[in-house]
Amino acid sequence: MSPLTLHPLFRDEPRRRLVGIGRDETAVLRLREQYATARAHGDRLAELFYDRLFRLHPQLRPMFRTDPSVQQSKLMDSLDAVMAYLDRPDEQALLLVEMGRRHAAYGAAPAHYRIVAELLSDAVTELLGDKADAQTRQDWLDAFNLVSDHMLAGAETLER
């Protein structure tokens, strides 16, 4: 049995190293439990996210041409998939790289990914209520920034 190493979410290594790293099973379990709590609110996570996104960054609204309820459902499906692969970083990286390619085709720019990470972290933290603290928000921000890095790596393949 190989020694357990930390998932990229919880390492201080360069974020561009997408695959081949193990995981911190405690962190994976904690994030999954917190996500299940947030997910118990249905699509509320997506509603909070899009409400804030369009209020704070109205210039991004034209990028979203789909019906809002459909867009919210797509976001939740994507988050569900990310969480399903959380303990399989190699497979997760492939999923996220492909998502990055698609988002680049929609017009997503590198700066947009940090906005999304911040707002998703805020939405998850809000849904967790008194079960969340500053560290919880930071954990989610780290997780969403890692997702962003993987997706940006996919977007870069379109630019070459």
Image (cartoon, rainbow, N blue to C red):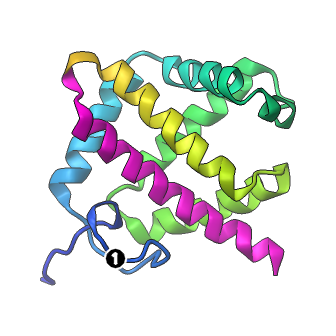
Label 1: which secondary element:
loop
Q: Residue furthest front?
A: 56
Q: Is residue 117 left or right of residue 134?
A: right
Res 68 quadrant in image = top right
Within the magenta stretch, is there residue 130?
no
Q: Quadrant of the N terminus?
A: bottom left
Which residue in the protein does label 1 denote? 13
82 w.r.t. 137: above or below: below
Coordinates of residue 32 in the picture (x, y in percent):
29, 41
111 w.r.t. 37: above or below: below
Residue 51 seen in the figure: yes
Q: The magenta stretch spans which residues?
A: 131-160
**Front in this rendered view, residue 9 or 75:** 9
Coordinates of residue 151 in the picture (x, y in percent):
61, 61
Q: Is residue 22 left or right of residue 82?
A: left
Instruction: Tell me which secondary structure the magenta stretch mostly adopts.
Output: helix
**Front in this rendered view, residue 54 or 156:** 54
What residue is at 35 percent from the left and 27 percent from the top? 125
Coordinates of residue 37 in the picture (x, y in percent):
30, 24
Within the magenta stretch, is there residue 150?
yes
Residue 95 seen in the figure: no
134 w.r.t. 159: above or below: above
Coordinates of residue 149 in the picture (x, y in percent):
54, 63
What residue is at 74 percent from the left and 52 percent from the top? 103
What residue is at 37 percent from the left and 20 percent from the top? 126
Identify the amino acid type marked 1: Glu
Res 40 quadrant in image = top left
